[in-house]
Image: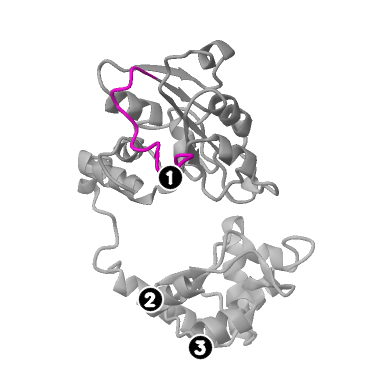
């Protein structure tokens, strides 16, 4: 709870209610949590916004008795509502509920005050529209350098060498030959995750950016040969002159419930790829995910290095900045 309490004390402007329930009581209808705890006890001065079409979920069958859903949510403390296709019905029902007194005008006034306060603080009345002249700098070199820095600073080193006295990192950028493998080594879409370009994200070169493979090729010495195979063949793994391997594996992009995963294992046979490579070659694993994934102890023993890179986005060079020793973890 501490980070959430800090956000409130520092004046966060908006909080979204969750689709979920607490003790069997849906949060969009939970006056105790939204009003008595969040607003009254914790002193939240911003506004509570609903999740997308969340009011429809307050009744069964879904979306039935919509007027009752509106009354329940607003009286519970929801100040702004994302209503989707029912915007006309919502306005009509809200007016009726306010005029009939089922939703007190004090509740309406409180919601309006909270919304306007946030808009005034944000300067939306002085500057209601975005400055289109700034579009030219979106994705500029400065922006990408900042994104690259964010990647560097977000990496988490989980293992560095089977023997603490013999660390794998930093990697030798002048090695004669290296292997790059894994489903996520050359895929911008996987690096970016969900809510990128499309709701659930996509795979492939979905935008301008640098994959991990691109970044490795840029970072190594001119004499170093890079072999890239998503799932290396037995012949490749039998090679005696590969100094080390970088294996990038992880999740496919997802958003919301489409990412539900009861097991949290590495998809796309990621564990098998890691295992086959680590059996033959000193291996650094770069894990690309928006949440923790499971690496079993038997597999962890095999690998020489492990980095949680989370979702590094378009700037794969933020990873190579660190693994080749230009920056520390």
**Disc number lying in front (3 or 1):** 1
Q: Is residue 310 visible?
A: no
Q: Secondary structure at mark 3?
A: helix
State the colouring used for the structure image. Answer: one colour
Which region is colored magenta?
A: 158-177
- Is 102 colored magenta in this rendering? no
- Image coordinates of residue 274 in percent, x first then y, are 56, 30
Q: Which disc is residue 40 wearing?
A: 3
Q: Secondary structure at mark 1?
A: loop
Cβ atoms under marks 1 and 2 closer than 8 Å: no
Q: Residue at x 39, y 31 (%)?
A: 212
Among the 4 quarters of the image, the one containing residue 69: bottom right
Vertical position of residue 100 compared to residue 231: above or below: below
Vertical position of residue 261 compared to residue 19: above or below: above
- Secondary structure mostly seen in magenta is loop
Label 3, label 1: how many angstroms apart (C-alpha)? 52 Å
Left or right of 255: which side holds 20? right
Pointer 1 local density, CA inside 10 Å: few below 14, some 14–19, many at least 20:
few
Which residue of the protein is positioned furthest toward the right in this rendering? 61
**Which residue in the structure is indicated by mark 2?**
116
Left or right of 239: which side holds 314? left
- Is 159 colored magenta in this rendering? yes
Name which of mark 3 and mark 1 comes first in the sequence.
3
Name which of mark 1 and mark 2 comes first in the sequence.
2
Vertical position of residue 129 compared to residue 205: above or below: below
**Which residue in the structure is indicated by mark 1?**
164
Q: Residue at x 51, y 39 (%)?
A: 201
Q: Judge by depth and name the residue closer to the eye, 196 or 234.
A: 234
């Amino acid at each position: 709870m501490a980070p959430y309490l800090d956000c409130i004390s520092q004046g966060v402007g908006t909080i979204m209610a969750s689709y979920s329930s607490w003790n069997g009581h849906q949060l969009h209808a939970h006056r105790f949590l939204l009003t008595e705890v969040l607003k009254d006890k914790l002193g939240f001065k911003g506004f509570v916004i609903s999740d997308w079409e969340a009011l429809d979920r307050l009744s069964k069958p879904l979306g039935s008795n919509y007027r009752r859903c509106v009354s329940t949510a607003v009286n519970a403390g929801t100040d702004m509502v994302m209503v989707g296709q029912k915007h006309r019905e919502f306005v009509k029902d809200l007016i009726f509920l306010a005029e009939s007194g089922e939703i007190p005008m004090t509740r309406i006034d409180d919601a309006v005050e909270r919304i306007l306060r946030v808009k005034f603080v944000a300067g939306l009345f002085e500057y209601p529209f975005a400055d289109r002249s700034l579009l030219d700098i979106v994705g500029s070199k400065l922006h990408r350098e900042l994104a690259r820095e964010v990647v560097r600073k977000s990496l988490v080193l989980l293992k560095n060498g089977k023997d603490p006295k013999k660390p794998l990192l930093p990697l030798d950028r002048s090695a004669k030959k290296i292997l790059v493998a894994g489903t996520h080594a050359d895929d911008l879409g996987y690096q970016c995750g969900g809510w990128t370009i499309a709701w659930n994200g996509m795979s492939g070169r979905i935008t301008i950016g640098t994959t991990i493979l691109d970044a490795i090729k840029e970072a190594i010495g001119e004499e170093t040969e890079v072999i890239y195979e998503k799932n290396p063949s037995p012949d490749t793994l039998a090679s005696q002159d590969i100094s080390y391997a970088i294996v990038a594996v992880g999740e496919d992009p997802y958003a919301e419930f489409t990412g539900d995963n009861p097991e949290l294992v590495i998809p796309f046979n990621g564990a098998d790829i890691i295992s086959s490579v680590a059996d033959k070659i000193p291996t650094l694993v770069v894990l690309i995910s928006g949440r923790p994934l499971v690496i079993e102890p038997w597999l962890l023993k095999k690998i020489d290095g492990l980095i949680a890179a989370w979702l590094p986005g378009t700037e794969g060079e933020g990873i190579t900045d660190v693994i080749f020793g230009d920056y520390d973890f």
